Every structure is written in C-alpha cells, then in structure tokens.
Amino acid sequence: MSIEHRLTELGITLPSPPNPVATYVPFVQVGDLLFISGMVPSRDGRVVFRGKVGREISKEQAYEAAKLSLLNALVTIRRAASSLDRVQRIVRMTGYVASGEGFVEQPFVINGASDLLVALFGEAGRHARVAVGVAELPMGVPVELELIVQLVSGVRLETQR
Amino acid sequence: MSIEHRLTELGITLPSPPNPVATYVPFVQVGDLLFISGMVPSRDGRVVFRGKVGREISKEQAYEAAKLSLLNALVTIRRAASSLDRVQRIVRMTGYVASGEGFVEQPFVINGASDLLVALFGEAGRHARVAVGVAELPMGVPVELELIVQLVSGVRLETQR
Amino acid sequence: MSIEHRLTELGITLPSPPNPVATYVPFVQVGDLLFISGMVPSRDGRVVFRGKVGREISKEQAYEAAKLSLLNALVTIRRAASSLDRVQRIVRMTGYVASGEGFVEQPFVINGASDLLVALFGEAGRHARVAVGVAELPMGVPVELELIVQLVSGVRLETQR
C-alpha cells in the first residue's frame, strides 16, 4: 500500500504547509537527502500548543504537540518530493522539548512523532533519533522537530519556493 | 558577481579564522558536504558578546552576535574551500540562543545570520534552519551557529589542519 | 595498527550495545554516512551518571560521562559496520550538556569524548564539533552525544536491529 493511502487509512489530514517565519526555506535537498527546517505544533499558521512540558503542559499534551509538529514536517516533505511515496528512509530526527525544571521524559514526548513515523512508513520510518530538553523554543512552543530524510534516487524537486 | 566581490561590496571584512578551543577541527568535508563546527561571536580569539538574551543582552545585540558568529563560519568555509565562490548551497543552519526565562524570539536573533547569508549568496544562501533556546553556551556567549554547506563538485580541500 | 587493536591497547572494553528507549533505532546508514542516535552515559542499560553539571556533578565527572557516552557510540558503530576498522572519518559530533545555571565549560566536558576519538582514530578521529548547554536531558543524564560517521566505501550493514 502506498504511504499516501496509509495516511488516509490512519485518518490523518495534513495541515497546510507551514511557512518559515524568517529568511530561510522549509527544506533543502542535496543529493538524495532532504533537510527539513525546524517544525513546530502549528496548524494553518497558528500555534496550537504553548508552554513548558512538566510545568504548563503535561507530557501527554506534549506527545500530541510532537505529533502535530510531525504533520507539518510530512506536508513539507510532500511539498518537496510531490508525494510521501518518494520517501526512501527517515534518516534522523532531532526533537527539542522545552522542559520545565526536572522534566526528563523527553523520549516519551518525541515518541509522539516517532510512533507516527513507524505507523506510516513501517521499517523505512525507523530513524536515528536525538531528544533533548531545551530552555525555550520559538513562540513558546513545547516541541520543535528537525528531520533528515532520504528520497528515492532520482527524485528532484522542481521549485524550492 | 562573485561572492568574494559581493562581500567587499557589502563592506564586510572577515575576522581571522577561529581556532577550536579543544581537540576537534573547525570543519570536515565528506563528499561535497562541508560540516562546520559550532561558531561563536568572537573576533581574533576574543569573545565579543556575553550573556543570555532577554536578560543581560537585548535581542538586537544578539542579532549582531549571530551576524558575527556567521562571519566566523564564512572565514572557516573560505579556509576550507579556498574561496566563498566555491559554495554551491548553504544547506542547513542550526542556531542555538542562550535564552533568559521567557525569551522566545530565537528566530529574530538567528535572522542576524540568515539575512546575511541571503544578502551574500542570494538563492544559494536560502537554507533549512532550526532555532532553539538553550540554557547555557560555551564561554557565556549568547549565540552559537552550526552549518552544513554544499560545495561545488570537485572541490577538495588540501589540508584540514 | 588496527583500531580494534588500539582499543585493546588503550585498555578499553566496550559496554554491551545500548537499546533505544523508544520507537527508533540506534543508527541509520545512508550512502557511506552513518547517523548515530543520541548516546548517554549508561552501561548495560543502567544510567551511570545523573544530575546537572556545575550543580550536582562536577565538570570532571561530566568529562567521564562524555567518555562513557562515547563508548556507547563506539559499540553502536561496531555493531553497524562489524568493526571499528571500517570507520573512514568521524565527521561531526554534537555534545549536549545538562548545565546548571552559569556553567559554561561545555567544551571541557565534551573533550571527554573528543580526546578519546583522537586517541583511538588519530587524524580520522578529528571531527567537527558543536557543544551546547541544555536545560534537561532524558533520564536526568548530564551528557548526550550525537554523531555522524563516514564509513569506508562499500561497507553496507546487514541488519539494522
């Protein structure tokens, strides 16, 4: 089954592609590697989750925030490669969690994104990962994700905005 | 116009190349990718900006610190590739901002580097980006930058110090 | 002399390979690049160091924690490539240090890993590096390392866990 199909089957509707808030672009391709900019839990340009995990928001809410951040990454990958079916492998994801004092369950939070990657891409979704707890994140979001993705050879994006 | 020319036109003089403060090197090339070590706002080995953003220093000062950190990255790229004209594309930049409690304007700060990259390289300077707020940075600097750069194919550095 | 030999000569015994605490894998290879997941100071699944550097634990202890984290990275590289002799180059290491207020000697801490890389691999161990001070790390560890490694061309891992 195609990944685009599987997305529908999982009942997931991707948000509209997020636009960078500054002088950079959402992705850059070099060879078959796609570098995705930091993705946050926003929907249609509006931040949905705010606060530090373990303080203003719970780890369960942050899990959902990681999931939403990943949806923004997915729609960016689709925009870069035309289709999620052109993903060869999710290579690496770094998850930054804005953490209240003493909160050390960053892996639980970032699983919100990792679990969905595996549900969607299967073996190709199993990635190397780094999860850290940072002091603050842009716009007060609790989670930010950065991804490196390998595309099927020969895929070359047309425009890069 | 060449990038080296454009640099002059923008009135920018690069500092002397920074030397790592420890057992590592300022850059490593693999294939056509150049990985640049963390760059901080120093000039000729002396740290110019210190403190956390939103507390000891303002976001405008931090914007300047990001710009100076980028100059150190640029002189490192020039040292690696002989000339900035051998840059094919700025691939990705991660900007770490030492942030005082509640400071969430990391994108504004890192624009100090992003804006200069675009002014200098044009489309080739538009990069994927991650901006996060960290607790502390080496030597008390407010900003640290990490870059991945694609060089024109066939460029191979001679020595790597 | 082979790297595996050198490891013995340095009196180093690698721990058993760490298993990810979540839905991801310890490494992903793409081309000749190996991306290693975040490595922490654990031995046989048990965290050995806990606390923030400059507060609960000293920079000297954290140096040892960085060294132990690197041992986990090394055993992961060996598992990926069958032997450490198949390492072409250590490309980049990012060191995250859980830092107490005002602790800015992250470079000293991460040298615990960098020094060992150079002792073990010589020139091939000299890497690009980023060291930052974060708010919190998973399970309360003081150090987490992320690495990108170039393997000798033609090395292709068999299984990926």
Image (cartoon, coloured by chain):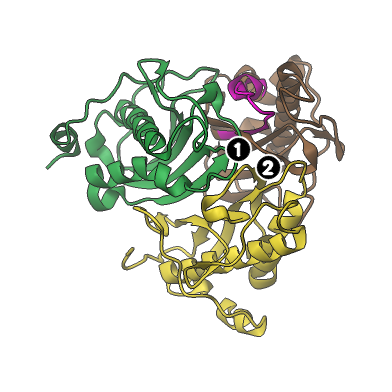
Chain colours: A yellow, B green, C brown
Q: Earlier in the sequence, mark 1 or mark 2?
A: 2
Asked whether the viewer can see residue C106, the reply is yes
Foreground: B151 or C11?
Answer: B151
Bin the neighbour count of mark 1 within 10 Å (Cα to Cα): few under 14, some 14-19, many 20 and up: many
Q: Residue at x 41, y 15 (%)?
A: B46
Q: Residue at x 69, y 28 (%)?
A: C100
Asked whether the viewer can see residue C161, the reply is no
Q: Could you tell me the amino acid type at mark 2?
A: Gly
Quadrant containing the N terminus of chain A in the rendered view: bottom right
Q: Residue at x 25, y 38 (%)?
A: B86
Foreground: C70 or B129?
Answer: B129
Report the magenta residues as a range: C93-112
Foreground: B131 or B59?
Answer: B59
Indicate the secondary structure of the residue bearing disc 2: strand
Q: Where in the figure is residue C55, as x and y percent of width and height?
A: 75, 24
Q: Is residue B24 left or right of residue B69?
A: right
Numbered label attached to residue B91: none
Quadrant containing the C terminus of chain A in the rendered view: bottom left
Q: Is residue C39 left or right of residue C148?
A: right
Q: Where in the figure is residue B130, as x and y percent of width and height?
A: 48, 49
The answer for which chain carries disc 1 is C
Look at mark 1 in the image and give the residue it sits on. Answer: C147
Measure how far apart labels 1 and 2 are at the Cα level.
8 Å
Where is residue C134, by image quadrant?
top right
Foreground: A147 or A25?
Answer: A25
**Disc 1, disc 2: CB below 8 Å?**
no
Numbered label attached to residue C38: 2
Q: Residue at x 23, y 45 (%)?
A: B119
Q: Could you tell me the amino acid type at mark 1?
A: Leu
